[in-house]
């Protein structure tokens, strides 16, 4: 899928060149295998190494740790190119490091960064972020997994769920409670695979994003050394709030990219599908539906690019990124729904790409903070009273 020239003003030559690299990687390494990986609900760990060799992992991470040193639009280019393969699961599985490593970059010591970041960016290890718990989703202040210091160790007790890349992760960045204070009592830790007391208690079966592994993790008297604590005790909440902004921008981008692929599929099908002696594109109802879909795609993409540009300039975007995530999620849901309708019975078949996109899109109003939480944030930013 070619870049839309309407948005050229946000991009420079490095973005366009990177998009081409990502597009070639997607066509060569993902597209031929995506159906098999979706059905298997798994993709080979080797893909991380191949993506690293192609320069796709950690494109926004600092160069001194093996990253690309790019900006947020390099991340957007990667997302758009990869989602053209029609599998959000592959994209988010490869991209789990984008939410796992920022707390380490923000709070970690140089020794910690050098120890844990380069192997992930080389594709040798997989990193995951563990925040959500069975009884605590968007209410981060309610986290119950606790970390109690005993000498030179912390003892972690609790569980995390819905963890992307949790099954295959070699290192998990875990948010745990070190103090009863709802916000000031949260601290990040790195828990490495093989640590006694740490286990994957369940690999989860999902409605969409099937190619990415998702896990419930268990910490049962799990002992980690003090040097695995990231930052000072109580520093986790502020770091997480900063991390959320990037995650929500990633999800918003997935929204417009998913909708863009669904629109392209629906347009092609409407040209090819014959009914009553002509292509269904010849019916006004189909043309108007596609026109509305294309408007939603452009509006979502325009909002996302504007917010990303503001983030690139270092502006405060809490309200805007929440709006972007909500709007893009709803646009993706509506466009995918219309695409399935245009396909008719075939749109309900697992062999059809729009069926997969329809399922994948349903997570967007949930992940990274629900639409309801986003509306609460927007309301507070705008000074709406109770």
Image (tube, rainbow, N blue to C red):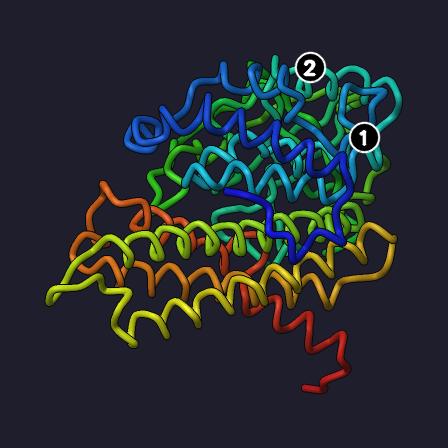
- Please say if 119 is above or below 131: above
- Is 80 on the left-hand or right-hand side of 108? left
Name the residue at 55% across, 29% down.
94
Q: Nearer the viewer, residue 363 or 333?
A: 333
Determine the CA span between mark 2 and mark 1: 16 Å
Name the residue at 77% across, 29% down.
229
Where residue 213 appears, x then y in whole percent? Answer: 43, 31
- Is 11 on the left-hand or right-hand side of 107? left
| Residue 16 lies in quadrant | top right
Question: As drawn, which residue projects farthest toward the front?
Answer: 277
Name the residue at 87% across, 53% down.
313
| Residue 21 lies in quadrant | top right
Q: Nearer the viewer, residue 350 or 141?
A: 350
- Please say if 275 is above or below 244: below
Q: Nearer the viewer, residue 340 or 149?
A: 340
Q: Secondary structure at mark 1?
A: loop
Q: Secondary structure at mark 2?
A: helix
| Residue 78 lies in quadrant | top right
Where residue 89 appears, x then y in whole percent? Answer: 44, 37
Q: Quick check: can you spot residue 180? A: no
Residue at the spot of label 2? 119
First reached walking from the N terminus: tag 2 or tag 1: 1
Question: As drawn, which residue projects farthest toward the left?
Answer: 276
Check disc 1: other Cα within 10 Å, few if <14, some if 14-19, many if 20+: some
Q: Which mark is residue 69?
A: 1
Q: Quick check: can you spot residue 360? A: yes
């Amino acid at each position: 899928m070619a870049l839309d020239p309407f948005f050229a003003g946000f991009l420079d030559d490095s973005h366009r060149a990177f998009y081409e690299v990502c597009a070639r990687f997607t066509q060569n390494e993902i597209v031929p295998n995506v159906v098999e990986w979706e059905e298997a609900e798994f993709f080979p760990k080797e893909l991380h190494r191949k993506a690293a060799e192609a320069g796709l992992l950690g494109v926004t991470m600092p160069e001194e740790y093996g990253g690309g040193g790019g900006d947020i639009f390099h991340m957007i280019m990667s997302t758009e190119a990869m989602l053209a393969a029609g599998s959000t699961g592959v994209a988010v599985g490869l991209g789990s490091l984008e939410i796992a490593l920022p707390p380490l970059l923000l709070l970690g010591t140089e020794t910690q960064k050098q120890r844990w970041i380069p192997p992930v960016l080389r594709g040798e290890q997989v990193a995951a972020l563990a925040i959500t718990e069975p009884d605590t989703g968007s209410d981060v202040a309610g986290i119950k997994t606790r970390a109690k210091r005993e000498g030179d160790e912390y003892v972690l007790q609790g569980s995390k769920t819905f963890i992307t890349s949790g099954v295959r992760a070699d290192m998990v960045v875990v948010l745990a409670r070190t103090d009863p204070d709802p916000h000031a009592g949260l601290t990040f830790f790195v828990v490495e695979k093989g640590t006694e007391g740490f286990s994957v208690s369940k690999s989860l079966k999902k409605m969409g994003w099937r190619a990415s592994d998702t896990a419930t993790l268990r910490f049962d008297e799990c002992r980690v050394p003090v040097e695995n604590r990231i930052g000072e005790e109580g520093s986790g909440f502020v770091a997480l709030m900063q991390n959320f902004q990037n995650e929500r921008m990633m999800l918003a981008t997935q929204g417009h990219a998913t909708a863009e692929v669904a629109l392209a599929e629906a347009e092609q099908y409407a040209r090819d599908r014959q009914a009553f002696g002509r292509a269904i594109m010849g019916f006004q109802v189909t043309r108007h539906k596609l026109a509305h879909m294309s408007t939603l795609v452009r509006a979502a993409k325009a909002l996302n690019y504007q917010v990303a540009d503001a983030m690139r300039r270092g502006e405060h975007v809490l309200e805007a990124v929440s709006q972007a995530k909500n709007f893009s999620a709803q646009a993706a849901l509506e466009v995918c729904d219309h695409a399935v309708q245009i396909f008719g019975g075939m749109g309900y078949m697992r062999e059809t790409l729009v069926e997969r996109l329809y399922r994948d899109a349903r997570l967007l109003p949930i992940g990274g903070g629900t639409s309801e939480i986003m509306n609460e944030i927007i309301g507070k930013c705008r000074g709406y009273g109770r």
